[in-house]
Image (cartoon, rainbow, N blue to C red):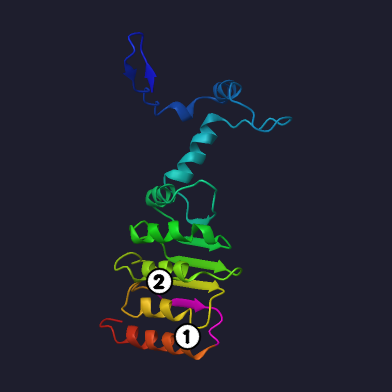
Amino acid sequence: MAQDDDGHVQPHPAISPFFLSLPDIAHASIASFLPDGNKGNDSRLRVSEVSRAMLESYGGTVTRMNLRHVEDSSAAALIALLRRQKRVAEVTVENERKIIPAFCQAIVQDCCRRVEAVHLRIWYPALTQEESDLVAQALEKDGALPALRALKIHWSLAHGGYSKFARALARGTAPQLQDLSFSFLGNTDDMDAVADMLEARARIPGR
């Protein structure tokens, strides 16, 4: 926002739709006024390239996302980003346990309805009871993951820890789910819970 001579706030003018089609010499001239973030190298991007990068991040041409935790980031920022994605089909969280609460909120708030594959890989330290509960609750939310076809949860959990995920899926949420992968199903509690879940889903009409 800017102010005029009388102190009134004026909105920024809209960017012309022809801005990105300016000739290279015009973009080079504009870029020369941009700060160089990498001293010693000419790292300035053409303004059109910057615009395309922002479009891919916020506008919806991304198909795969690997989520990373950034200090001082908020769940609202991740939710807003995922909500804008129109083509993202695969989301991976790998050894980024701090982002689990925000990702679960995004699922519950229907920001992942187009996602077809979710990969959760966290090895050490083991997930807490609270973190496991958040994931189970997100998976159990009706209509939150209607397109999900593949779910892979590979992380360190206490004895019987995978049972809650199996129970969350037993009611038939994620109706398109075809590929389900859990790691370390080496105890009776987990294996029985997974077997019960598969039998329950098989009894759902139309499956």
- Kindly identify which residue carries mark 1: 190
Crowding at label 2, few (<14), some or many (≥20) Cα neighbours within 10 Å? many
> Looking at the image, is 35 positioned above or below residue 92?
above
- Out of 11 and 43, give the one closest to the viewer: 11
Q: What type is the residue that disc 1 sits on?
A: Asp
Image side of residue 176 versus residue 66, left or right: left
- Out of 179 and 97, give the one closest to the viewer: 97
Q: Position of residue 98 (x, y in %)?
A: 52, 58
Crowding at label 1, few (<14), some or many (≥20) Cα neighbours within 10 Å? many
| SS label for mark 1 | helix
Q: Position of residue 202 (x, y in %)?
A: 33, 86
Q: What type is the residue that disc 2 sits on?
A: Ala
**Residue at left 48%, top 39%?**
54
**Residue at left 33%, top 74%?**
175
Quadrant where the image shows the C terminus: bottom left
| SS label for mark 2 | helix
Res 20 label? none
**Residue at left 64%, top 28%?**
36
> Of all residues shown, which one is farthest toward the front?
129
Write down the region rendered in magenta. Answer: 177-186
> Looking at the image, is 74 positioned above or below residue 146?
above
Q: Earlier in the sequence, mark 1 or mark 2?
A: 2
- Out of 18 and 62, give the one closest to the viewer: 62
Q: Position of residue 38 (x, y in %)?
A: 68, 33
Q: Count up the numbered dots.
A: 2
Quadrant where the image shows the N terminus: top left
**Residue at left 29%, top 66%?**
143
Let me know if residue 72 is in the magenta part. Answer: no
Res 136 label? 2
Q: CA distance from mark 1 to mark 2?
A: 14 Å
Let me know if residue 181 is in the magenta part. Answer: yes
